[in-house]
Image: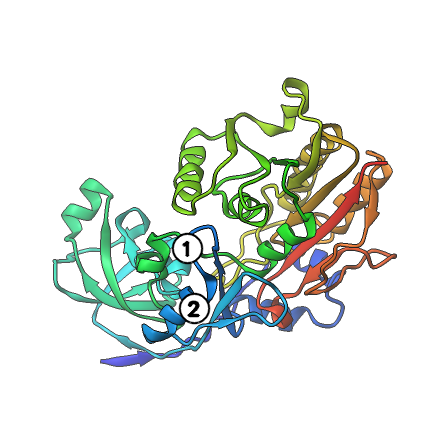
């Protein structure tokens, strides 16, 4: 058995590189390099709707995990991230990009994410690679090639060693009991920036899979009316599963294209969260980046449609928060500028600032940078006058 070095160089489309160069002047190569790795901490949310946060953390420590609380962000727990060298087996199984990125962080490889598993038999020791041959993990085959390709269900490879030394968090008793939810630090900060209060009407226009929506329930102790939209019925059902597991109540899920919610619903919302589809460039670790400038522009115009809806749904004096897990100027500061110039929303400080100030002139928005914060993210907060 040999071992694999984890270095992997991401390639970017030239048009994307030019777009990002305007954001990361002189730092771009460092940022791109960091996207292939993880930050020093892997975050999760401690859910006090299901039990005591201190008890949960103590239980995790008693279970052998080096878990800690974030210094400033309430409800944020973390595990330290360490990188490992993976032993190489002769048998290779190729995973699609998303499955491979999950395996890197300790997830098992599911049959739905397998691209190639020629001559695989149950019990074989295997190395999992992505399509470029980058090694992401190693483990034992739990299904044969025939079974994987025929049924596309269940665990194909039980991962015993991943590139980043993290436990299978979704299989822990804490996860199953709803005591924790796997959530990035910026996603938690976004909900705190929205600052929902009991008895308010809060709309999440892009709710699936309910990570932020469930935190809005937690922050209001299930005493606000939280309404979540997604146009995909399956995603809504997945969201419902998470909300139930996390002991959320007083919520409403609506299957509907929320770009048109203001035409079909009248909520007089106190708060609206807009967390729309984006290029996802800030999600780490990455194995490849296929984004182009054209893709960025298409998504930016899509994001503006959701902001238009939010501006119509929120009541006077109400709050709109816009967040995306990406770093392009077109999807971040430019969408915020659109909200001000075309929708009449007034930008205010995206407190609490945990990352750093955004690139807007007034420095009211908030950014997380991949090489500094272990994630790329953008948050802007507005009030409707």
Between disc 2 and disc 1, whose residue precedes? 2
Q: Is residue 309 above or below residue 217?
A: above
Mark seen at residue 97: 1
Residue displayed at 79% across by 59% down: 359
Q: Could you say whether the residue bearing mark 1 is in a helix, strand or loop? A: helix
Q: Quadrant of residue 21?
A: bottom right
x, y percent for residue 354:
68, 65
- Mark 2–mark 1 Cα distance, whole angstroms, equals 32 Å
- In this rendering, the answer to whether 214 lies above or below 377 is above
Badge 2 density bin: few <14, some 14–19, many ≥20, Cα 10 Å: many
Residue visible at 47% across and 55% down in the picture: 47
Residue at screen point 54% across, 61% down:
75
Q: Residue at x 30, y 58 (%)?
A: 171
Is residue 127 visible to us here? yes
Q: Is residue 241 left or right of residue 382?
A: left
Residue with the mark numbered 2: 57
Q: Where residue 310 appears, x then y in whole percent?
A: 70, 33
Q: Give how far across and how far down residue 169 sits, in percent.
A: 36, 61
């Amino acid at each position: 058995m040999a071992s694999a070095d984890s270095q992997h160089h991401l390639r970017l489309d030239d048009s994307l590189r030019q777009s990002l160069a305007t954001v990361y002047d002189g730092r771009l190569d460092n940022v791109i390099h960091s996207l292939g790795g993880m930050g020093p901490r892997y975050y999760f949310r401690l859910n006090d709707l299901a039990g005591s946060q201190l008890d949960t953390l103590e239980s995790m420590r008693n279970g052998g995990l080096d878990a800690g609380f974030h210094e400033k962000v309430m409800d944020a727990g973390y595990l330290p991230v360490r990188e490992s060298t993976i032993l190489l087996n002769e048998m290779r199984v190729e995973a699609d990009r998303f499955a491979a990125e999950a395996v890197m962080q300790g997830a098992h490889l599911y049959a739905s994410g397998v691209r190639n598993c020629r001559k695989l038999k149950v019990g074989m020791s295997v190395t999992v690679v992505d399509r470029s041959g980058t090694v992401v993990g190693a483990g034992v085959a739990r299904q044969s090639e025939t079974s994987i390709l025929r049924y596309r269900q269940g665990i194909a490879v039980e991962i015993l060693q991943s590139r980043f030394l993290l436990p299978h968090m979704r299989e822990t008793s804490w996860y199953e009991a709803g005591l924790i939810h796997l959530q990035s630090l910026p996603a938690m900060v976004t909900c705190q920036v929205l600052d929902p209060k009991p008895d308010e009407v809060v709309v999440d226009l892009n709710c699936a899979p309910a990570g932020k929506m469930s935190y809005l329930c937690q922050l209001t102790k299930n005493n606000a009316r939280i309404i979540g939209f997604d146009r995909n019925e399956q995603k809504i059902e997945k969201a419902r599963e998470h909300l139930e597991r996390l002991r959320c109540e007083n919520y409403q899920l609506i299957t509907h294209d929320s770009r048109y919610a203001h035409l079909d619903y009248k909520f007089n919302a106190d708060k609206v969260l807009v967390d729309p589809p984006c290029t996802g460039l800030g999600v780490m670790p990455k194995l490849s980046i296929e984004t182009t400038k054209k893709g960025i522009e298409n998504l930016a115009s899509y994001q503006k449609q959701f902001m238009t809806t939010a501006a119509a749904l929120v009541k006077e004096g109400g709050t709109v928060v816009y967040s995306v897990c990406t770093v392009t100027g077109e999807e971040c500061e430019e969408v915020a500028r659109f909200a001000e110039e075309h929708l009449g929303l007034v930008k205010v400080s995206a407190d609490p600032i945990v990352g750093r100030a955004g690139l807007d002139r007034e420095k009211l928005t908030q950014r997380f940078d991949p090489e500094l914060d272990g994630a790329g993210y953008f948050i802007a907060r507005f009030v409707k006058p």
